[in-house]
Amino acid sequence: MARSFSESFEIRGRDFLEAGNVSTGIKRMLKELGVSKEIVRRVAIATYEAEMNVVMYAREATVTVELTPHFIKIVVDDRGPGIPDVELAMQEGYSTATPEMREMGFGAGMGLPNIKRNADKFNIGSVVGKGTRLDIVVNIN
Amino acid sequence: MILSEIRVLLSCDVFAGEEYLDRQVLYGCASDLMSDVLAFSRSGALLLTGLVNVQTIQTAHIAEVDAVVLVRGKKPDQSIIAVAREKHVPLLGTPYSMYEAAGILYRAGIPSTLQCAPKVENAHRV
């Protein structure tokens, strides 16, 4: 597998019916490009958690997927409230979710730690009142 | 163990994925928290859950969970069944509670996706 490419997708906040469709599309695309099952699973889980965070908390986001022969990079750049205390948000179990979010099976404070667990490199930057950007890298080799 | 054997063990209705009942189930997990499923499930696992919505199916698909069994007689609506068919996720339902269903599968030899038993000398053996 020596192909390289980049593609972008849009996620709409609060759209619970469509939630997960961007991650599902990225998963399908990587599978079709011949990326191994275990790598696809890690990328899909990290992207899905990020997508659910956007749907639950932000107005909208752009997701960019970059595939190279050596790694897959996912950037999730949202327009939303931002995170006042990133260190606190990274702790398992810390959550500001509403009952509606919890009814969906999310909002247990596992999302960001789950993303980090599935990434080889992970970076989070957030500006309160503007938005949050996640850089997720999964190595292929 | 294949899914059709689990269907019998748990007296399941099959809501979607009749054509996948020959799938091998290697592990089991039970949770209503989808982030826990994403963190602790594995490919080839069966998920027991009481959470009945579209995200249950999306989560199973993303985490490559091989089958979802709804517990305590819960019934999915048509929109959930449609997503399960579209994503090729077998969706079953059992009258047993989550605790009972997990116990039946564990006793039948299906291990957990996550081994949490403490490693002590005289730990209880099953």
Image: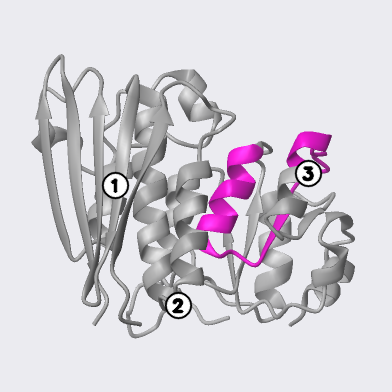
Kind of residue sitting beneath label 1: Thr
Q: CA distance from mark 2 to mark 3?
A: 27 Å
Can I make out residue A114 in this image? yes
Q: Chain of mark 3?
A: B
Q: In the current view of this chain or complex, which residue is farthest to the top?
A: A129
Q: CA distance from mark 1 to mark 3?
A: 29 Å
- Magenta region includes residue B77: yes
Residue at image position (77%, 53%) is B85
Mark 1 or 3: in front is 1
Q: Locate residue A132 relative to residue A85 in the image: left or right.
A: right
Residue A25 location in percent, x, y?
50, 52
Tell me the SS state at disc 2: loop
Quadrant holding the N terminus of chain A: bottom left
Span shown in magenta: B54-80
Q: Residue A34: which disc?
A: 2
Q: Quadrant of residue B66?
A: bottom right
Q: Locate residue B92 relative to residue A115 in the image: left or right.
A: right
Tell me the SS state at disc 1: strand
- Above or below residue B39? Residue B122 is below
Quadrant holding the C terminus of chain A: bottom left
Q: In the current view of this chain or complex, which residue is farthest to the bottom?
A: B121
Q: CA distance from mark 1 to mark 2?
A: 19 Å
